[in-house]
Amino acid sequence: MSIRKPADYEAIYSRALFEDVIPFWMTHSPDREFGGYLHSLDRDGSAIDTEKFMWPLNREIWVFSALCNSIENRPEWLEMAKLGADFLKKHGRDPNGDWYFVLARDGSPVVQAYNLFAECFVAVGFAEYAKAAGDEEALDIALDAYERFQGRRPNPKGKYEKVLPGARPFKALTFSMATINMSVVLSRIRPDDKCEALIRQDIDAILRDFIDADGRVIRENVTMDGKCDDSSYIGRHINPGHGIEAMWFIMEAAAERGDQETIARAAEAIKWSLDFGWDKEYGGIYYFMDRLGKPHTELQWDMKLWWPQVETLIATLMAYRYTGDRLFYDWFEKIHDYTWAIFPDVEHGEWFGYANRQGEINIPCKGNRWKCCFHIPRALLMIAELCRDIQKSQEIPG
């Protein structure tokens, strides 16, 4: 039977966060010998690889810092955040100040600084940690990473780019959505005109170029002049969970700035993505799709991954919170039922990340270079907060 009240969902998501997911990572992730975190973890939490990737390291710093800032500045949470921040202060950057992509367990570099999104997660992780710890050095690191990200946007891979200059002239949604997210996090800590300008600039770019009203999809890639191009895989490629995540980034920023018109436009695009991206036979949000239904170049296109589901949970509940449209609450309940039936691991704790189209778990690890202490705890934290806000501000659905 569906649980109708936000108070019930608040209890479920808070319990999962504080009694399951966070204890799992606090038990299995800290590397007390070398610093930082072990994040490639098997189902039972044992390490299956000791290399340390820049994305998961900074994402875990963000999670424990956000708990301190949103819930309570508990010493054990702050110590966890500090463990990651201190490790990266010491080992994370190359001589030019760019952030390596992979480190060995002891912090020695393994993969060079080719991936621009290392800077993105440094910016959000260290900004959140700066607020939790009162650490000015961490804030300086966050601001420097933010500037490096913006400076590298025109040529994100630099000398590591494989595509020849001028070929594949597409721009990607991910750069604008990352800038919105970074700018919102930084603006809460140190309000800045540049952050505000970039928030508006990139929201406008997404609404203008990537929301395809004719196709009723959120495009992942468009031409450099913002046009839709269905002549290639890259132009037709749709990542429903990514587009939905971008929309809640936009709604969050717009809500903090009192921009109801932008919230409405983002919410409408979420409806399209739900209609397009939901598997009507087996349930769940697809990983990848082709805009015209052509065979996709990615063989895992029809898998059901953890993060599109939980990002859609955030987006639908947030859309209900800010629009009052009951359709979004109904979708939230539908996705909740699907997600909670498949991904939580009742035996060993935390959540699985990878299921096939039919909803059968086919990769049982709890962490790797992509799945880590981030999407699930962020979703649990945000959904519990949204439920509290709904109870305070709106009539309870029923």
Image (cartoon, rainbow, N blue to C red):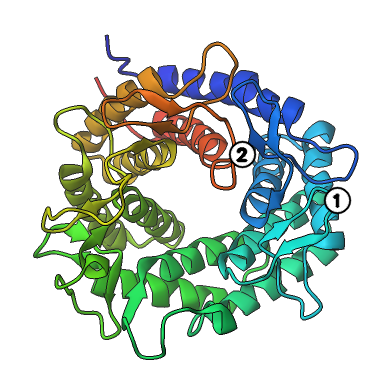
Quadrant (top left/top right/bottom left/bottom right) for the N terminus: top left
Q: Residue at x 63, y 48 (%)?
A: 56
Q: Secondary structure at mark 1?
A: loop
Q: On screen, 115 above or below 314?
A: below
Count residues near mark 1 (Cα–Cα under 10 Å), then give few for <14, some for 14-19, many for 20+.
some
Residue denoted by label 1? 106
Q: Is residue 279 left or right of residue 346?
A: left
Mark 1 or mark 2: whose residue is earlier in sequence: 1
Q: Secondary structure at mark 2?
A: loop
Q: Give the image quarter of residue 20.
A: top right
Residue 388 picture location, percent across and down:
47, 30
Amino acid type, residue under disc 1 in the picture:
Asp
Marks 1 and 2 close (CB-CB < 8 Å): no
Residue denoted by label 2? 373
Q: Residue at x 56, y 65 (%)?
A: 117
Quadrant (top left/top right/bottom left/bottom right) for the C terminus: top left
